[in-house]
Amino acid sequence: QSVLTQPPSASGTPGQRVTISCFGSSSNIGSNTVNWYQQLPGTAPKLLIYSHNQRPSGVPDRFSGSKSGTSASLAISGLQSEDEADYYCAAWDDSLNGRVFGGGTKLTVL
Amino acid sequence: EVQLLESGGGLIQPGGSLRLSCAASGFTFSNYAMSWVRQAPGKGLEWVSAISGGDSTYYADSVKGRFTISRDNSKNTLFLQMNSLRAEDTALYYCAKERRVVVAATNYMDVWGKGTTVTVSS
């Protein structure tokens, strides 16, 4: 059971916009920054979004993040086949004094 | 180019010990905190431990008291000593570079290695 809650799966067709949610609590998302990681099949995770809504160099602006209260969202617009991957949210948890991840969302491009 | 290369994984019996290493290159190692993250077969990511650029350490409850994170800044190497291993420790272990020298709530892991596999089984 992950501390942060994500839907196990999401899907969309090419060109569509999809959103992945991440629910936490006051001790993690509610008080700290949220980061998102993308894990393509068979590869190591890659930083996708940091500090709620910042993109590292090289990440397309089709990817965006937001946070509201104790939840966060990752939005992918203009969906492409290469976006098919697992997506994880993460945040520091003040109560646990450690980092916590969501269970991951498997995105399928139909 | 920033690179992280993990090693030391393998097959170990329950109750045994293993020491993972992560060789870093392409950046000033001592200026950044480092973390270990693991992924059990077919499962999601689980943060294991982190260490500041100095010696402040942090652990997930699942490994506290059994695992020890350390670093040798002179050799640009991160370690994870794993004792009293259990079947549930079986996973791919990733080494990751943090964005800042301290382990902080505003931090994030911006570079990841390819991982080393640990299998705990009799």
Image: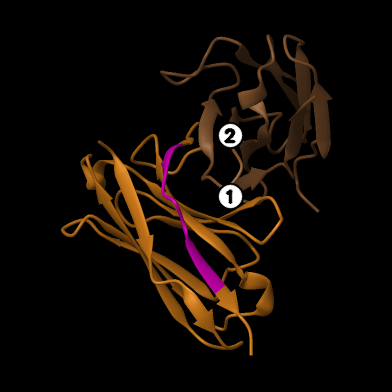
SS for tag 1? strand
Quadrant of the snapshot with the N terminus of chain B: top left
Name the kind of residue labelled 2 in the image.
Tyr
Colour of chain A, in one word, is: brown
Q: Which residues are magenta?
A: B110-118
Q: Hue of chain B? A: orange
Residue B105 appears anywhere in the view: no
Marked residue nearer the N-terminal end (1 or 2): 2
**CA–CA distance in space, label 1 to label 2:** 17 Å
Q: Looking at numbered disc 1 in the image, what kind of residue is underneath it?
A: Gly
Q: Position of residue B15 (x, y in %)?
A: 58, 88
> Which residue does the numbered mark 2 point to in the structure image?
A37
Residue A110, above or below B46 = above
Q: Nearer the viewer, residue B100 or A102?
A: A102
- The correct choice, above or below, for A103 with respect to B76 in the image is above
Residue drawn at (45%, 79%), measured in percent from left and top? B18
Residue A101 visible here: yes
Quarter placement of the C terminus of chain B: bottom right
What number of labels is visible? 2
Q: Nearer the viewer, residue B31 or B97?
A: B97
User: Is residue B111 on the magenta stretch?
Assistant: yes
Corner quadrant of residue A108: top right
Nearer mark to the viewer, of 1 and 2: 2
